[in-house]
Every structure is written in C-alpha cells, then in structure tokens.
C-alpha cells in the first residue's frame, strides 16, 4: 500500500509540473494598463472610474515560438447616475485571461499574436443587479516583446468579447444599466525570467 501511495504521489507531481517542464522558459511579473473603450451601454450613467487594471502575470515559454500566459487583472470601477440623485456605485472586477501566444522570429523585437479565454467575476455596490455577475470572454491581441537580460517588457493591445452584459445598476423607475460586451485594453507586462 505504501508503494501504491508513493506511485500516486509521483504521478500527481508529474501532472502538476509537466506544463512547466516542457516550457523553455518561465517568467513571473506584473501586468497593467487601461481600457480604451467605454464600459457602459447607456448614456444615463457616467463612468468615473480610474480606468486602470493591474495584476500578476505568469509566462511559460513553449517550443516552436509558442508560449502560455496567465494573468489576474483587477479593476475597480465607479459609476454615477446622471438622472437620479444616488450615491456613486463601485464595482470590483477580476479578469483571468488564459492565453496561447505565437512569437514571430525577428532579431531585436519579438512581435507576437495571442488568443484565448478569460473568465471574469464582478462584485458590485448596493444597486448592482442580482443577476449573474460572471462573464466569459474570448480574447485576441498582439504586441511586441522586448528583452533586456532577464527583464522582459511586453506592450500589448487586447480585444475581449464577453458572452453577456452583466447589469451594474437597476432602477425601478429608470433604465437598467449594463456593461458592454466589447472591451479594448492597452497593457504593459513587466516580467523577470527565472529560468
């Protein structure tokens, strides 16, 4: 029985480390930037957010110029109704892009294209909709990778199409305000290659 448990342990360790083992490199760091599009689908609410997003990033280099990137992007958004005197509403958003990247073979800068999937979780203020506060998005983007020793800088432009438009504000005597399904972000990733 002891030998069987040891076998299961080794299988578990191999399964957990295989994605990294096959990688040519491993980098960790941070990514941040801003949104170029309006978050809201209605003119009755003003977006007074700082419009920034920030979070950690993990990058695994794969053979043949491919790579895998996982991010956790935090956004704090603030909205103010223009037609009714209510307090500003605050919405916290976490986005988790999981992306496959293809780097093109150029000598100095490394242009790349990327695509993948991004779940999103929203938590809102007192007037936020009781309806589902989760979304799933399809992400495409492109950018360039710049390397200075082990330091890597990656400016990227990303487009995300969300599968739904979660309601942010619902008024009994007014319109329902929801988030748009299309989002364009300009981001800068800063990471350190640890292997």
Image (spheres, grey):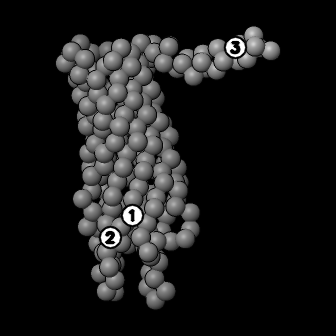
Q: Position of residue 61 (x, y in %)?
A: 41, 19
N-terminal-most mark, 3 or 1: 3
Circle 2 SS class: strand
Name the disc covering residue 91, or none.
1
The image shows residue 64 at horizontal and vertical percentages of 44, 13
Crowding at dot 2, Cα within 10 Å, few <14 / some 14-19 / many 20+, comes out as many
Residue bearing the label numbered 3: 6
Q: Which residue is drawn at 50% across and 71% down?
A: 129
Comparing labels 3 and 1, the label whose residue is closer to the camera: 3
Pointer 1: residues within 10 angstroms few (<14), some, or many (20+)? some
- Pointer 3 or 2: first along the chain: 3
141 left or right, relative to 173:
left
Point out which mark residue 79 bears.
2
Q: Vertical placement of 187 versus 149: above or below?
A: below
- Give the CA separation, mark 2 to mark 1: 8 Å
For the residues labelled 3 and 2, the Cα–Cα distance comes to 55 Å
Dot 3, how many residues are within 10 Å of its Cα: few (below 14), some (14-19), or many (20+)? few
Q: Which of marks 3 and 2 is in front?
A: 3
Location of the N terminus by quadrant is: top right
């Amino acid at each position: 029985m002891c030998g069987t448990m040891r076998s299961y342990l080794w299988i578990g360790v191999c399964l957990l480390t295989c994605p990294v083992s096959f990688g040519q490199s491993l980098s960790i760091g941070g990514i941040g930037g801003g949104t170029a599009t309006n978050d809201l689908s209605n003119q009755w609410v003003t977006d007074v957010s700082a419009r920034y997003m920030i979070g950690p990033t993990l990058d695994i280099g794969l053979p043949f110029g491919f790579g895998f990137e996982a991010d956790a992007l935090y956004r704090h958004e603030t909205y103010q109704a223009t037609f009714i005197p209510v307090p500003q509403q605050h919405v916290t958003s976490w986005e988790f892009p999981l992306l496959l990247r293809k780097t093109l073979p150029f000598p100095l800068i490394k242009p790349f294209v990327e695509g993948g999937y991004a779940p999103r979780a929203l938590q809102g203020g007192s007037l936020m909709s009781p309806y589902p506060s989760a979304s799933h998005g399809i992400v495409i983007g492109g950018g360039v990778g710049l390397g200075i020793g082990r330091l890597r800088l990656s400016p990227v432009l990303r487009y995300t199409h969300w599968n739904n438009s979660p309601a942010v504000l619902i008024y009994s005597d007014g319109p329902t305000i929801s988030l748009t399904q299309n989002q364009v972000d300009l981001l800068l990733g800063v990471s350190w290659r640890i292997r």
